[in-house]
Amino acid sequence: MAEQNCTHDCSSCGENCPSRKQDPASFLEKPHQLSSIKKVIAVASGKGGVGKSLVTSMLAVEMARRGYKTAVLDADITGPSIPKVFGIHQRAYSDEIGIYPAVSEKGTQVISSNMLLETEDTPVIWRGPVLAGVVKQFWTDVIWKDVDFMFVDLPPGTGDVPLTVFQSIPVDGVMVVTTPQDLVSMIVSKALNMAGAMHIPTLGLIENMSYVECPDCGKKIHIFGEGRTQHVADQFGIPLLAQLPIDPAVPALCDAGRVEYVQMPYLQRACDVAEKLIKEEA
Ligand SMILES: Nc1ncnc2c1ncn2[C@@H]1O[C@H](COP(=O)(O)OP(=O)(O)OP(=O)(O)O)[C@@H](O)[C@H]1O
């Protein structure tokens, strides 16, 4: 937003401009003293099943392909899917110094509630404050080694856990995943309000399951309609960073724990935006 148009109401704006106000009563927690994390990007959605975990994982994968050291903090405590798609099945290791994340085949560091449980299919039946406490510990007690980009997979909606993440972790920006059939306007407005209330910029929208591509002629078929997410992005003044097709190869590779072999060139603009956060600082 141009400075002359600034309303000074950060809760309704996604810009990370110099006049964005800092909260004096910060609840930010310090990471483990042996951790080094340069940038944190949270990935949010309005409801489950829209592909938020896939997008979170793929952002880490793509940034790793660009040569960055990446990490995923799986804050979706009751529906953790990150370790599985990265082919991680071992439990987290800890000692008197801290908790150690698992490292994927290609080097992404991962922590998830699944890695704390007896078995992968043990359900998490913890109440809100416990869930929030676990997420905080993933930040304070885990030793994250030389991370350039940490991506946080938030649970859907605006409950205890996303709030805890935004309050206690210094999130540099939020990306919101939607699908064309979502109530995009309402979801985006809620996400913007929540992030804005915490003075965290919304970096943009990612529309998943936008279309299918005909394998014979390459024509894009917009099964759920077209143009709504772009319209909402324009309305809120935030960029539409990507439109991802429905790709049958994706669930097959994810189920086999091989998300690092998924090809998703459509995420390049989202990665550019993430990369800019580091470059701006250099
Ligand atoms: N673009 C896509 N093409 C094909 N399959 C997809 C695509 N995006 C996601 N999926 C599949 O849809 C399912 C749900 O995706 P995912 O777990 O990422 O959603 P989510 O929003 O994180 O859900 P939840 O909030 O319940 O964890 C997965 O099986 C995933 O592999």
Image (cartoon, rainbow, N blue to C red):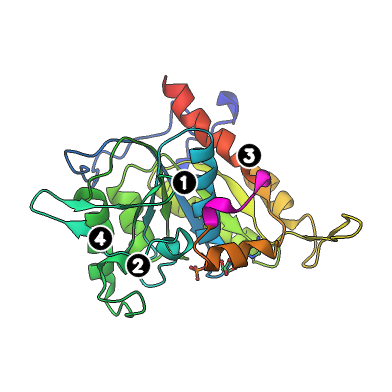
Specify whether residue 189 is in view: no
Measure the C-alpha gap from mark 2 to mark 4. Answer: 15 Å
Q: At label 4, which amino acid type do we have?
A: Ala
Indicate the quadrant containing the C terminus: top left, top right, bottom left or bottom right.
top left
Measure the C-alpha gap from mark 1 to mark 4. Answer: 37 Å
- Residue carrying label 3: 268
Label 4 Cα neighbours within 10 Å, binned few <14 / some 14-19 / many ≥20? some
Q: At label 1, which amino acid type do we have?
A: Ser
Closer to the chain start, of discs 2 and 4, is 2
Q: At label 3, which amino acid type do we have?
A: Gln
> Which is in the foreground here, disc 3 or disc 1?
3
Q: Residue at x 26, y 50 (%)?
A: 139
Q: Which residues are magenta?
A: 259-266
- Residue carrying label 1: 11
Closer to the chain start, of discs 3 and 4, is 4
- Residue carrying label 4: 92
Q: Residue at x 47, y 65 (%)?
A: 156
Q: At label 2, which amino acid type do we have?
A: Ile
Q: Is residue 272 left or right of residue 89?
A: right
Q: What percent of the width, then of the height, locates residue 236?
A: 62, 46
Closer to the chain start, of discs 1 and 4, is 1
Measure the C-alpha gap from mark 2 to mark 1. Answer: 27 Å
